[in-house]
Image (spheres, rainbow, N blue to C red):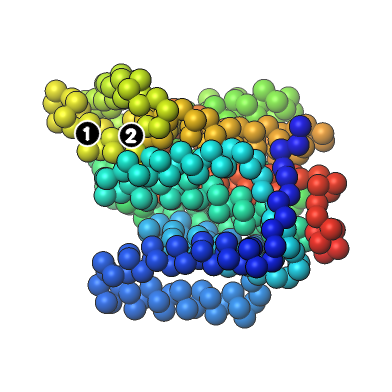
């Protein structure tokens, strides 16, 4: 059964749809700007103007936009996140105009429809301050990423560009993270990021991007550079002392060495040498944290309480981030408080119910399955397999966190997933305009 359909819309209806989406995002940006200082607004407008000028000067295309989007990860901010979504819509308009298209390719239309409906219901129940941000990261981001990237020009391959720029940004962030960790050996500091745990979702995916690029490189010096990049990214992760993120790397490496015998020995050696990569400063911080570490207990209690909430709100959930407002009254001690359910699968059920969760996860795992069948299995492509493994590893890390629901990682994850689906798409499913461009 085909997983993609083409929905034909009259030209005027298409532009009305685009206008509504742009207007909605512009309104959101306007509200954010009104709550900010004049100095920040001026700086934001200058940066946005420079960004738009560069795009118009060089030409608006998805790969060029992704280079600029990658810079967000040097120091992620909500304003840049919303601005990136607006720019993605601008790319959609530009590509539709360039290709003279009068139709929109909608991937998994039923799943996205269910996601939007139940996401809207959950949003109507939301009263937490950050609820709208989590709604955007969970519902709006996947819709925009698949809509924009699924309808972008196929003569402009973007996945390789995205992997390279994200890996280079992660290299810089990782180097600074190692430096600040050595200067503060007993603290958990997420490099330039505000949260030392969230950054590990970024590190995990960038690590496997770098490994994939190392396999893809033809020159030994290029291969050595990408391997060194992967090592630095991994060290940056180690210094945050996030155990599940480290296990996600081991999980992914395990998948790689099980799949490819020719790297099995080196892969096993690399995993075995991981303890030797941990500097003494890291061990000191680990010992300091472990004495007072009750994170496992916090998670177990959160999961137990979450199942009670799910049972009472099975179909529509309680709303995005509403957990934060009610959970403090459900625990015996303030020290056991958890801002979310610390498991993305449970958290989705809590926030927008069974049907919304099934639609959300269905889009993810159907996309990963499609990529494996179309890009990995036919030729045994190890580069594609590394990318696929990285996405699975991030989903593995989400067993104890909600990485892909947080706005920084959400945009990274859904752009990557949409690019994987797009670039693995058979030529037979391309539109006539795509074929004309190729």
Residue occupying image coordinates x 44% and y 48%: 137
Question: Image height check: is 235 above or below 433?
Answer: above
The quadrant of the picture occupied by the N terminus is top right
Q: Is residue 421 left or right of residue 351?
A: right
| Number of numbered tags placed on the structure image | 2
Kindly identify which numbered label has been placed on residue 22: none
The answer to which of 428 and 162 lies nearer the viewer is: 428
1 or 2: tag closer to the N-terminus: 2
The answer to which of 243 and 280 lies nearer the viewer is: 243
Q: Secondary structure at mark 1?
A: helix
The answer to which of 314 and 346 lies nearer the viewer is: 314
> Is residue 381 visible to us here?
no
Distance (Cα) linking label 1 and label 2: 10 Å
Q: Report the residue marked by disc 2.
A: 318
Q: Report the residue marked by disc 1.
A: 326
Residue occupying image coordinates x 65% and y 40%: 108
Residues marked 1 and 2 touching at CB (< 8 Å):
yes
Query: Which-is-in-front pick, marks 1 and 2?
Result: 2
Q: Secondary structure at mark 2?
A: loop
> Is residue 105 visible to us here?
yes
x and y percentages locating residue 166 in the rendered image: 55, 54
x and y percentages locating residue 299 in the rendered image: 31, 25
Question: Image height check: is 297 above or below 421?
Answer: above
x and y percentages locating residue 315 in the rendered image: 42, 28
x and y percentages locating residue 368 in the rendered image: 64, 35
Residue occupying image coordinates x 40% and y 66%: 27
- In the rendered image, the residue lying farthest to the left is 333
The local crowd at label 2, few if under 14, some if 14 to 19, many if 20 or more residues have their Cα within 10 Å, is many
């Amino acid at each position: 059964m085909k997983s993609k359909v083409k929905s034909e819309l009259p030209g005027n209806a298409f532009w009305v749809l685009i206008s509504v989406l742009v207007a909605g995002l512009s309104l959101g940006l306007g509200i954010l700007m009104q709550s900010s200082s004049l100095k920040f607004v001026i700086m934001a407008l200058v940066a946005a103007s420079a960004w738009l000028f560069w795009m118009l000067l060089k030409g608006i295309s998805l790969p060029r936009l992704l280079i600029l989007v990658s810079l967000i990860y040097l120091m992620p901010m909500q304003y840049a996140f919303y601005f990136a979504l607006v720019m993605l819509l601008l790319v959609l308009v530009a590509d539709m105009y360039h290709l003279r298209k009068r139709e929109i390719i909608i991937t998994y239309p039923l799943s996205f429809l269910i996601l939007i409906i139940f996401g809207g219901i959950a949003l109507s129940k939301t009263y937490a301050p950050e609820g709208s941000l989590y709604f955007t990261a969970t519902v709006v981001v996947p819709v925009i990423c698949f809509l924009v990237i699924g309808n972008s020009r196929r003569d402009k391959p973007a996945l390789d560009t995205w992997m390279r720029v994200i890996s280079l940004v992660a290299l810089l962030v990782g180097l600074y993270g190692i430096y600040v960790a050595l200067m503060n050996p007993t603290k958990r500091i997420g490099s330039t990021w505000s949260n030392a745990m969230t950054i590990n979702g970024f590190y995990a995916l960038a690590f496997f991007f770098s490994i994939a690029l190392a396999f893809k490189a033809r020159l030994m010096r290029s291969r050595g550079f990408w391997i060194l990049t992967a090592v630095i990214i991994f060290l940056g992760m180690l210094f945050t002392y996030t155990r599940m993120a480290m296990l996600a790397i081991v999980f992914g490496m395990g998948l790689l060495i099980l799949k490819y015998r020719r790297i099995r020995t080196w892969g096993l050696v690399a995993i075995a040498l991981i303890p030797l990569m941990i500097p003494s400063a890291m061990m000191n911080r680990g010992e300091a944290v472990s004495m007072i570490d009750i994170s496992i207990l916090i998670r177990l209690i959160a999961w137990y309480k979450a199942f009670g909430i799910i049972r009472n709100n099975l179909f529509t959930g309680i709303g995005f981030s509403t957990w934060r407002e009610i959970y403090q009254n459900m625990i015996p001690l303030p020290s056991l408080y958890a801002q979310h359910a610390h498991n993305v699968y449970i958290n989705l059920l809590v926030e927008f119910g069974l049907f919304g969760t099934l639609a959300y996860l269905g889009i993810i795992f159907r996309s990963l399955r499609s990529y494996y069948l179309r890009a990995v299995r036919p030729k045994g492509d190890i580069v594609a397999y590394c990318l696929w493994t990285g996405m699975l590893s991030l989903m593995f890390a989400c067993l104890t966190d909600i990485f892909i629901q947080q706005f920084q990682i959400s945009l990274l994850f859904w752009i990557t997933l949409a690019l994987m689906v797009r670039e693995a798409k058979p030529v037979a499913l391309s539109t006539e305009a795509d074929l004309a461009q190729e």
